[in-house]
């Protein structure tokens, strides 16, 4: 049994959104979406695998209400069709994954396009793992331009490689609600059991050392160029991913608020 960590001391954590529309696709509707009192936040999270995007997306959802939209979660759920729709794009993605291939941009985009209601949602969004290539970023930019939906910011989390590897090697994920833990820095109250839903915690296959190397290379090749793309769009917000998850979240929100103020006065 592990000691409770700070994230859990405040009491049971309730997700602000069941993400039904994201996992099941149109026409599913989220049952418990909370609308923000002010303008919605529409964020993209960038950063290397394991930097903590999913962890921050969860905390940002708690604090800003914007829904956590993760393509990685979607792919993992796709292997259990009961949790996901069986649309042609989803089926195509699964076929690629079964063959051990990367899912091509056209298929990923089709999956996101089928869920464009989540991008239009009045509650806002925190995109995690998408876009991942310049092609995906261009497709998202076009959709948001056509729909006249402004992007609030692209948060780029920065952390030294050694710390990233340590975070990945200790990660555990809930098979039911996808909550993320770390065996040292964010342990669950009871070993192997999710605090939020009592689901079983497992180690992702792609967190094994040989997979981590491949993912880091893919990140450098395909995703790191997005930093320049969003810099040119004047949307990039670099944030240090050091410290506890709560500290990083507070740092992110301060940077977002400062940026929003600066943009409003331009
Ligand atoms: P995805 O799930 O998106 O993987 P990723 O981008 O590699 O990111 P991770 O989920 O590994 O890490 P994270 O940054 O979210 O970190 P986390 O918060 O979990 O995608 C998986 C795969 O699907 C991809 O490799 C790709 O093949 C495919 N895919 C997905 N999207 C795609 C797309 N758009 N196009 C094509 N293919 C796509 O944290 C990591 C660990 O650190 C956890 O244990 C956590 O508890 C711990 N931790 C977090 N914060 C802290 C902290 N401050 N201090 C200490 N520990 C911390």
Image (cartoon, rainbow, N blue to C red):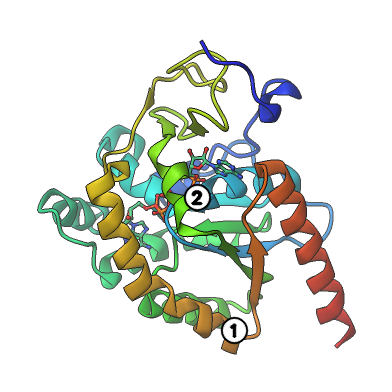
Instruction: Return the residue nearer the eye: 125 or 54.
Output: 54
Where residue 253 sits in the image (x, y, percent)? Answer: 76, 57
Q: Are marks 1 and 2 in contact (CB under 8 Å)?
A: no
Residue at the right extreme? 265
The residue identified by callout 1 is 231
Q: Is residue 139 above or below residue 78?
A: below
**Split into 4 quadrants, where in the image is the C terminus?**
bottom right
Where residue 143 sits in the image (x, y, percent)? Answer: 49, 77
| Label 2 residue near ligand 1, CB within 8 Å | yes
Q: Quadrant of residue 219?
A: bottom left
Q: Is residue 167 above or below residue 146?
A: above
| Label 1 residue near ligand 1, CB within 8 Å | no
The residue identified by callout 2 is 163
Can residue 89 be spotted in the picture? yes
Compare marks 1 and 2 and give the one earlier in the sequence.
Answer: 2
Can residue 27 be spotted in the picture? no
Q: How many marks?
A: 2
Where residue 233 sits in the image (x, y, percent)? Answer: 60, 86
Residue at the left extreme? 99
Tell me the SS state at disc 2: helix
Tell me the SS state at disc 1: helix
């Amino acid at each position: 049994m592990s000691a409770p960590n700070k994230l859990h001391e405040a009491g049971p954590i309730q997700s602000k959104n069941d993400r039904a529309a994201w996992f099941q696709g149109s026409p599913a509707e989220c049952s418990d979406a909370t609308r923000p009192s002010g303008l919605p936040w529409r964020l993209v999270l960038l950063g290397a695998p394991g930097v903590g995007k999913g962890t921050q997306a969860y905390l940002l959802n708690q604090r800003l209400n914007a829904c956590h939209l993760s393509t990685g979660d979607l792919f993992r759920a796709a292997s259990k069709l009961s949790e996901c729709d069986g649309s042609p794009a989803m089926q195509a993605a699964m076929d690629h994954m079964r063959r051990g291939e990367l899912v091509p941009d056209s298929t990923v985009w089709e999956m996101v396009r089928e869920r464009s209601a989540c991008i239009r949602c009045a509650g806002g969004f925190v995109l995690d793992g998408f876009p991942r290539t310049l092609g995906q970023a261009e497709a998202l930019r076009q959709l948001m331009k056509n729909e006249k939906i402004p992007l609030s910011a692209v948060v780029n989390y920065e952390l030294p490689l050694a710390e990233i590897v340590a975070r990945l090697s200790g990660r555990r994920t809930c098979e039911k609600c996808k909550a993320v833990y770390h065996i040292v820095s964010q342990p669950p109250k009871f070993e192997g059991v999710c605090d939020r839903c009592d689901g079983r915690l497992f180690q992702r296959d792609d967190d094994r050392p040989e997979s981590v190397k491949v993912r880091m290379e893919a990140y450098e090749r395909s995703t790191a160029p997005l930093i320049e793309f969003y810099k040119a769009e004047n949307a990039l917000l670099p944030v240090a991913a050091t410290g506890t998850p709560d500290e990083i979240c507070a740092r992110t929100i301060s940077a977002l608020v400062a940026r929003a103020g600066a943009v409003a006065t331009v």
